[in-house]
Amino acid sequence: MKHVLFAVLVLFTLTTGCRKIYPDGPAIKQVRNVSGFDKIEAGISGNIRFIQGPVSKVEVEAAENIQSYIITEVKGNKLIMKTQPNVNIRGGSVNIYITNPTLTGATLAGSGNIQFDSEIAANTLELKLSGSGNISMPALSANTLFSSITGSGNLSINGGTVTKQEILITGHGDYETRQMQSEESKINLTGSGSAKLWANSKLEVTITGSGDVWYLGSPTINTSITGSGKVRKL
């Protein structure tokens, strides 16, 4: 009985220990002293705006009284954006503006959005979406693109060229890159999300879920379909 009571008390503490913070006053911009990263990871309910530029700079725009609860730190080569543990920011808006010369990866794990405001150039780029927010990019120039969607958010790239792209969709978000040309595309779709892409030479599709793959181009197509999804030409 004592063990049960202790477990209940622990559970109560964990579920009620989150501190609610309400923004107060106008938003201000605060420059953060962080550098030496080429990957970004957002686990915050806010909007991330990224520009590939010559100088590294990170600015957080939010109400002054919540600035100290928004963490921006570099671990290894990754810029991590999150709120302090056991803190729930209620209402208001958080905008984080990032400029950096290079980018090799971006991860969105929260309900916010990552918006790229410039074309991205990279040798290899990895995009991971596991939250309910969206990742959008105007154009990409890369040798290899790795993308994964395990949440309900959408990932879109609206132009550019890549030599090869590999996509994994296990959630029900959508992948939209039909305006970005690729030579080779490989996709594994086990969820209910759909993909629209452009492949010129080779398209390899594995579907075990209910989502469809739509394609542009005239590639050689190899398929393995055990789910209800289909491969369709746009």
Image: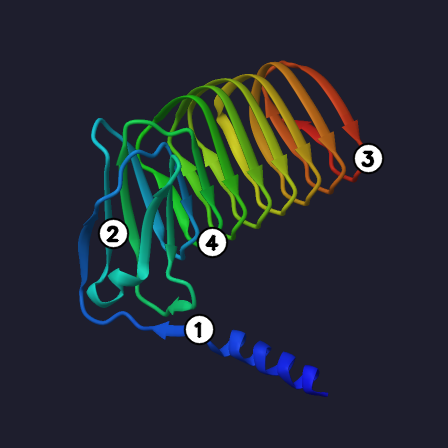
Q: Which residue is outermost to the right?
A: 226
Foreground residue among 159 and 132: 132
Spatial CA span between label 2 and label 1:
23 Å
User: In the image, what residue occupies the spot 58% across and 45% down?
Assistant: 173
Q: Is residue 234 visible in this depiction of the protein?
A: no
| Label 2, residues with CA under 10 Å away: few <14, some 14-19, many ≥20 | many
Secondary structure of residue under mark 3: loop
User: In the image, what residue occupies the spot 71% across and 40% down?
Assistant: 190
Q: Nearer the viewer, mark 1 or mark 3?
A: 1
Quarter of the image that includes the C terminus: top right
User: In the image, what residue occupies the spot 58% across and 19% down?
Assistant: 199
Spatial CA span between label 3 and label 4:
31 Å
Spatial CA span between label 1 and label 3:
44 Å
Residue 136 in the image, given as x and y percentages of width and height? 42, 39
Quarter of the image that includes the N terminus: bottom right
**Residue behind mark 2:** 60
Q: Nearer the viewer, mark 3 or mark 4?
A: 4
Q: Earlier in the sequence, mark 1 or mark 4?
A: 1
* Label disc, if present, on residue 18 of the rendered structure: 1
Spatial CA span between label 1 and label 4:
17 Å
Q: Earlier in the sequence, mark 3 or mark 4?
A: 4
Amino acid on which the number 4 mark rests in the picture: Gly
Spatial CA span between label 4 and label 2:
17 Å
Image position of 24 with respect to 45: above or below = below
Residue 182 in the image, given as x and y percentages of width and height? 53, 18
**Residue behind mark 3:** 226
Amino acid on which the number 1 mark rests in the picture: Cys
Q: Nearer the viewer, mark 1 or mark 4?
A: 1
